[in-house]
Amino acid sequence: MEFGFNNKHLAFLKNEFDLDEESIGAKNDDELDDVYNLICDIEIDETCKAGNNDLSERGETAVEIVNIMADALGYVQDDDYDDEDEEVA
């Protein structure tokens, strides 16, 4: 699968997980889901650390990669969620 990561994204993936473009492309859906979840964890951690301050570069890069992967993998992002779609029991 092709994600279209830029050099900054690839450097992040290499530094954080020792992944390069080739190894990411060779991963199956379950493995990609695992990588996606790990990057989401970084996004959450960095957001919590930032509090009311600006997100760190690490956090910003994680956000960008999460968005790219979510689009490529067909995941629904929170901003696509509509409260009116939620069933009330």
Image (tube, rainbow, N blue to C red):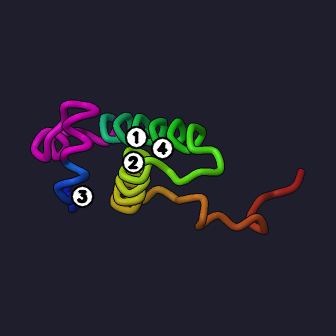
Q: Amino acid at mark 1?
A: Ile
Q: Which residue is denoted by mark 1 in the rendering?
A: 39
Q: Are the residues flagged by discs 3 and 4 in contact, CB closer than 8 Å?
A: no
Q: Which residue is denoted by mark 2 in the rendering?
A: 62
Q: How many marks?
A: 4
Query: Which is nearer the N-term, disc 3 or disc 4?
Result: 3
Which residue appears at 48% of the width and 43% of the height? 43
Depth check, mark 1 against mark 4: the one in front is 4
Instruction: Determine the CA span between mark 1 and mark 3.
Output: 15 Å
Quadrant location of the N terminus?
bottom left
Query: Which is nearer the N-term, disc 2 or disc 3?
Result: 3
Depth check, mark 1 against mark 3: the one in front is 1
Which numbered circle lies on residue 3? 3
Q: Is residue 89 magenta?
A: no
> How far across and how far down the image is residue 61, in percent?
36, 51
Camera-side residue of 58 and 69:
58
In the image: residue 40, left or right of residue 35:
right
Tag 4 secondary structure: helix
Read off the magenta span. Answer: 11-30
Residue most extreme to the left: 22
Instruction: Determine the CA span between mark 3 and mark 4.
Output: 18 Å
Q: Which residue is denoted by mark 4 in the rendering?
A: 43
Quarter-wise, where is residue 7 in the image?
A: bottom left
Which residue appears at 19% of the width and 48% of the height? 10
In the image: residue 31, left or right of residue 74:
left
The rendered magenta stretch, by its main secondary structure, is classed as helix
Q: Are the residues flagged by discs 2 and 4 in contact, CB closer than 8 Å?
A: yes
**Relative height, residue 38 to residue 62 (above, below):** above
